Image (tube, grey):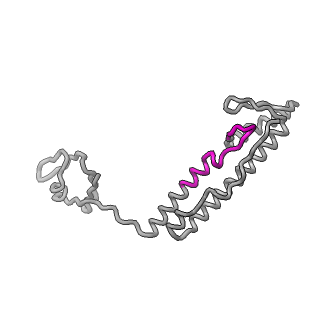
Amino acid sequence: MKQYYNANTNEWYVEGTAITRIVDGGVFSGIPNVALLTSWGFEEWVEPTPTPAQQLKRAKAEKISSLLDYDNSDSVNSFSIGGMSMWLTREERTQIGESVSAYEAAGISQMTKYFNGTPYTFALVQWREMLNALIVYASEALNVTERHKANINALETIEAVEAYDYEQGYPQKLVFAIQ
């Protein structure tokens, strides 16, 4: 759809929309044609061509958006227990850690948690080891993402931004065995 702008009145008009306007002692209500818009001082708005700096900034923003999508995907946010792929958010890791502490305080030596309908029972020491490994993994993955952001922002050409591979450098995914 075309847009029109009146620089004298700072008004915008989008082609095909109805407007009401006072004109020559009367009222126009409807969808104006181009000749009418022109007589009112409107000109077709043509989006200015972005400068090279603006194009580079846009390319970086798009690449970082793709990086963040990748960072939030199963490609980064997953581990497996006994072949079952899953992920625990920071809040879930905190909740499980609190549960482990409560079980320890109650003198209980193992705990069962359900993930996607499957029960997983481990000794509390194993739960702690897995949680600690997940926390380290998540922290290292975040460091990689932040490093990629900095690297992308430091690039000086659109070609370099487009060629940048942000999928590299992430830590090896964790695999926990069921014993």
**Pick the front one: 13 or 83:** 83
**Residue 166 position in % (x across, y down):** 60, 58
**Residue 145 position in % (x across, y down):** 64, 56
The image quarter in which residue 115 lies:
top right
**Pick the front one: 168 or 22:** 168
Outermost residue to the left: 25
**Residue 175 position in % (x across, y down):** 75, 44
**Residue 81 position in % (x across, y down):** 74, 39
Q: Which residues are magenta?
A: 65-86
The residue drawn where x is 28% and y is 55% is 3
Residue 126 lies in magenta, yes or no? no
> Which quarter of the rendering shows the C terminus?
top right
**Pick the front one: 76 or 139:** 76
The residue drawn where x is 66% and y is 46% is 77
In the displayed structure, does residue 23 sit left or right of residue 113?
Answer: left
The image quarter in which residue 118 lies:
top right
The image quarter in which residue 94 lies:
top right
State whether residue 156 is above or below residue 81.
Answer: below
Outermost residue to the front: 83
The residue drawn where x is 50% and y is 67% is 159
The residue drawn where x is 62% and y is 56% is 167
Q: How many marks?
A: 0
